[in-house]
């Protein structure tokens, strides 16, 4: 089942001599429950693609469909509500609020949205991420890996259809990075959520179900992981 699709997606910044084509007609389909990694060098367009998919930026042309909604055609208020309820974000910077406890940070977006918090569901996430003993702790008392787990819990708490992770392990050491991505993968699978992650870390990308490589604003390769005994490569 298709969860996300971009069609002929283009993004142009500037005009004339300063014009930069960040995306050049990107066509991408992501299945429900898939864990997709997007890799590419700095300036390749991967962050632009993620931000447009998440409704944080608008395309110059083309369409983005998430969970059967063409999000780039929504009015600003509709897009804000959709993004808040259907898309969870995990960034390189944890973006936790220092004056709030772990639990308060996790449920804050739901409360800001005026929705009822499903504490049983939140409790499941906290347990799966190994944060039971930290719910009343403040962010500055946690390690980097623990803070990123809190950020993941916050992204999952609103039961979004899609999790977008922007260099989520950029501030973590190698072992903690693998642990955090492993937990993200497990929780997303448990709650049937789709993950799209951008990373420059090839080892981390290998944990995904599929890897696409972007160069110069275009998808140049798509590699689907075969967890049996081989990898298959194809063009997107």
Image: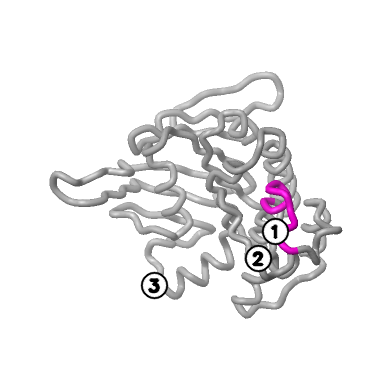
Q: Is residue 190 left or right of residue 109?
A: right
Q: In this view, does 82 lie above or below 14?
A: below
Which residue is nearer to you in this view: 49 or 108? 108
Q: Distance between the residues labelled 2 and 1?
A: 7 Å
Look at the magenta stretch and give its main secondary structure: helix
The residue drawn where x is 33% and y is 52% is: 62
Q: Residue 75, which numbered label?
A: 3
Q: Position of residue 9 (x, y in %)?
A: 35, 48
- Tag 2 and tag 1, C-beta contact below 8 Å: yes
Q: Do the residues labelled 3 and 1 touch (CB within 8 Å)?
A: no
Looking at the image, tell me whether mark 3 or mark 1 is earlier in sequence order: 3
| Percent position of residue 97, x then y | 63, 66
Residue furthest right in the image: 133
- Circle 2 — which element? loop
10 Å crowding of disc 1: few (<14), some (14-19), many (20+):
few
Q: What element carries label 1?
A: helix
Q: Give the range drawn in magenta.
A: 138-148
Q: Is residue 89 above or below residue 205?
A: below
Residue placed under numbered mark 2 in the picture: 98
Q: From this viewpoint, which residue is outermost toward the bottom?
A: 114
Exactly how many numbered labels are in the figure?
A: 3
């Amino acid at each position: 089942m298709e969860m996300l699709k971009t069609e002929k997606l283009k993004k142009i910044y500037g005009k004339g001599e300063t014009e930069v084509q960040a995306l050049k007609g990107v066509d991408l389909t992501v299945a429900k429950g898939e864990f997709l990694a997007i890799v590419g060098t700095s300036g390749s367009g991967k962050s632009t693609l993620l931000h447009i998919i998440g409704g944080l930026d608008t395309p110059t042309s083309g369409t983005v469909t998430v969970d059967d909604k063409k999000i780039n055609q929504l009015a600003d208020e509709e897009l804000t509500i959709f993004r808040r309820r259907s898309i969870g974000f995990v960034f390189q910077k944890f973006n936790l609020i220092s004056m709030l406890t772990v639990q308060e940070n996790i449920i804050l977006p739901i409360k800001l949205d005026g929705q009822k918090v499903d504490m049983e569901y939140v409790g499941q996430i906290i347990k799966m991420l190994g944060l039971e003993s930290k719910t009343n702790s403040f962010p500055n008392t946690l390690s980097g890996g623990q803070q990123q787990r809190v950020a993941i819990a916050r992204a999952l708490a609103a039961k979004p259809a899609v999790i977008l992770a922007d260099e989520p392990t950029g501030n973590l050491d190698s072992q903690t990075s693998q642990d955090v991505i492993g937990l993200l993968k497990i929780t997303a699978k448990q709650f049937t959520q789709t993950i799209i992650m951008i990373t420059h870390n090839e080892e981390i990308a290998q944990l995904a179900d599929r890897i696409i490589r972007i160069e110069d604003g275009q998808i140049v390769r798509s590699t689907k992981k075969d967890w049996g005994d081989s990898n298959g490569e194809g063009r997107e």
